[in-house]
Image (tube, grey):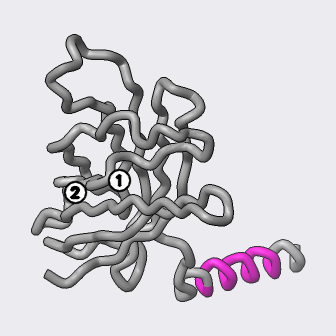
């Protein structure tokens, strides 16, 4: 009986102490009305580096992100010599939940000479906001051309306006 009381007391003490220890790796809310920007970098061989800028805005409420901008298109895989095959669709927004978001963009070609709506694939973006204005994300280019697919981890930083 005495051992079980000791075990219960020890368990309660450990639980109480854990309440005062900050959790590491937890997401934090985004900067309300903030602008996050940065680079996704891909090295191809020793001589060639590709950089793809990415930015997005946070709503003043901090509950939605949007206006995603990929000025150079979506990053492409290590063996794709053709470069981005399509642009991520514009005017997408995502809800911030649990300190992060998850969104997919269909790839589109903005070329009037191409007739029809070919299936190009998607770009999937997800990540969490962290302390000090950092967003840690993961992007997958899921184009239908398998040689051009790629997957990248990256960090963006809150920018002054």
Picture layout, residue 72 above or below residue 88: below
Give yes or no for contact between labels 1 and 2 (Cβ–Cβ under 8 Å).
yes
Q: Quadrant of residue 48?
A: bottom right
Horizontal and vertical percent position of residue 141: 47, 40
* Outermost front residue: 47
**Taking 108 as reference, is 129 left or right?**
right
Residue pointed to by mark 2:
65
**Badge 2: few (under 14), some or many (20 or more) residues near its Cα, within 10 Å?**
many
Q: Nearer the viewer, residue 117 or 82?
A: 82
**Taking 136 as reference, is 119 left or right?**
left
Segment tinted magenta in the rendering? 5-17
Magenta span: chief secondary structure: helix
Mark nearer the N terminus (1 vs 2): 2
* Outermost top residue: 116
Residue pointed to by mark 1:
101
* Outermost left residue: 60
Q: Nearer the viewer, residue 132 or 40?
A: 40
> Which residue does the image show at 56% across and 43% down from the upper left?
77
Horizontal and vertical percent position of residue 62: 19, 66
Q: Quadrant of residue 83?
A: top left
Task: Give the quadrant of the C terminus.
Answer: bottom left
Task: Give the quadrant of the N terminus.
Answer: bottom right
Horizontal and vertical percent position of residue 66: 19, 54
């Amino acid at each position: 009986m005495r051992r079980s009381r000791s075990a219960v007391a020890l368990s309660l003490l450990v639980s109480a102490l854990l309440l005062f220890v900050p959790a590491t790796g937890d997401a934090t809310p985004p900067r309300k009305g903030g602008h996050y920007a940065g680079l996704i970098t891909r090295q191809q061989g020793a001589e060639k580096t590709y950089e793809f800028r990415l930015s997005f805005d946070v709503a003043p409420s901090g509950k939605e992100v949007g206006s995603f901008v990929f000025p150079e298109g979506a990053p492409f895989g290590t063996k794709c010599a053709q470069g981005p095959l399509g642009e991520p669709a514009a005017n997408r927004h995502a809800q911030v939940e649990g300190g992060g978001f998850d969104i997919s963009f269909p790839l589109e070609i903005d070329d009037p000479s191409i007739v029809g709506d070919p299936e190009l694939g998607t770009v999937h973006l997800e990540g969490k906001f962290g302390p000090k204005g950092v967003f840690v994300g993961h992007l997958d280019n899921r184009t239908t051309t398998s040689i051009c697919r790629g997957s990248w981890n990256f960090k963006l930083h809150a920018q002054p306006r």
